[in-house]
Image: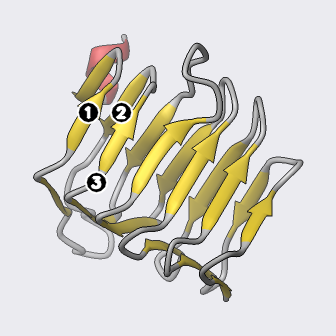
Amino acid sequence: MNIFDAGSSETYQNDIGIEDSAKIIPENSAVVILPDDYKLHLRGNMISLIMKPGSRMIFGENSGIVCDSGGKVVANNAVFTSADSTKIWNGISLKHRSQDTIKSCIIKNADFGINIMNKNDDEETEIPYSAEISVCSFSAVVGLRERSERDRQ
């Protein structure tokens, strides 16, 4: 588990896939910076990015977050934005059966603020899909998009 506290910042240099019960928790005004062309991939039922109030994620161009196979984002009063207001980051992609909660967040300068894909109940595990996205502010090319596999064919 990585917990980032007030006054701390962390910059990641390479794509990272997080699995096996890991949690990333920026809290108390902590900042996590992802450089250009970086993808934070959260995969698995016990994987979480938990953004506490006042925390920020700053993205380089073409960077973003991908959650699938149960990986989830839980964010409350957090900011997701680009490092450079003239550059676009990819946004947050929520795929498959994650249980996401994104409330009262600011999402700026993203190609797609939140991209929801293939969010159906999991027939194998009978885990119902649920997401709460509420009271968020989007300043992006597209704020919220929902797609299924059929849409891509």
- The residue where tag 1 is placed is 138
The residue at the point 38 percent across, 61 percent down is 78
- At mark 2, the secondary structure is strand
Nearer the observer, 149 or 95: 95
The percent position of residue 69, horizontal first and vertical second, equals: 47, 61
First in sequence, mark 3 or 2: give its number.
3
Q: Image height check: is 133 above or below 137? A: below
- The residue where tag 3 is placed is 105
Q: Amino acid at mark 1?
A: Phe
Q: Residues within 10 Å of mark 1 (few under 14, many from 20)?
A: some
Q: Are marks 1 and 2 in contact (CB under 8 Å)?
A: yes
- At mark 3, the secondary structure is loop
- The residue where tag 2 is placed is 113
First in sequence, mark 1 or 2: give its number.
2
Residue 17 image-quadrant placement: bottom right
- Residue 147 seen in this snapshot: no
The residue at the point 66 percent across, 25 percent down is 62
